[in-house]
Image (tube, rainbow, N blue to C red):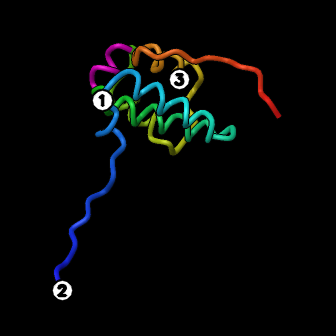
Amino acid sequence: MRKTKTTRYDVAEHLRTPEEMAAYLEACLEEAKGDAAFIAKALGDIARARGMGQVARDAGLSRESLYKALSGERSPDFDTILKVVNALGLRLHAAAAHG
């Protein structure tokens, strides 16, 4: 019997366009159910797809602090979230909740 080699799935490898990144963030916002760390992790996935060093520079943050903020292990400040969203070229939208 042959062994099957598996590799860890990395969503960042599949986020190639700004539209894919925005759709991923939108889906994560819907799934988060108020979990800010979950959203931070999603932004981290997008930042890795874009290039963490470039996103850190564009957001005015150090690369290390960006990794920590978007690790999903804690909830970053909203100011950091806004800087990262802006650096990624994305926008947050609000809509009325339905039920």
Image: magenta residue range:
52-58
Q: In the rendering, at what x and y percent does residue 74 appear?
A: 55, 41
Q: Would residue 21 be counted in the magenta stretch?
A: no
Rendered image: mark on residue 1? 2
Give the amino acid type for the residue marked by disc 2 in the picture.
Met
On the rendered structure, is 4 left or right of 83?
Answer: left
Residue in the image at 32% along x and 33% along y:
48
Q: Is residue 69 visible?
A: no
Q: Is residue 77 visible?
A: yes
Q: In the rendering, at what x and y percent does residue 17 appear?
A: 33, 24
Residue in the image at 51% along x and 21% along y:
80
Dot 1: what SS? Answer: loop
- Residue placed under numbered mark 1 in the picture: 16
Q: State the quadrant of the C terminus.
A: top right
Between residue 63 and residue 32, name the one nearer to us. Answer: 32
- Residue placed under numbered mark 3 in the picture: 81
Query: Of discs 2 and 3, which sits in the foreground?
Result: 2
Dot 2: what SS? Answer: loop
The correct choice, above or below, for 79 with respect to 68 in the image is above
Kindly indicate whether the residue at mark 1 contacts the one at mark 2 (C-beta within 8 angstroms). Answer: no
State the predominant SS element of the stretch in magenta.
helix
Hey, which quadrant is residue 21 in on the image?
top left
The correct choice, above or below, for 3 with respect to 30 in the image is below
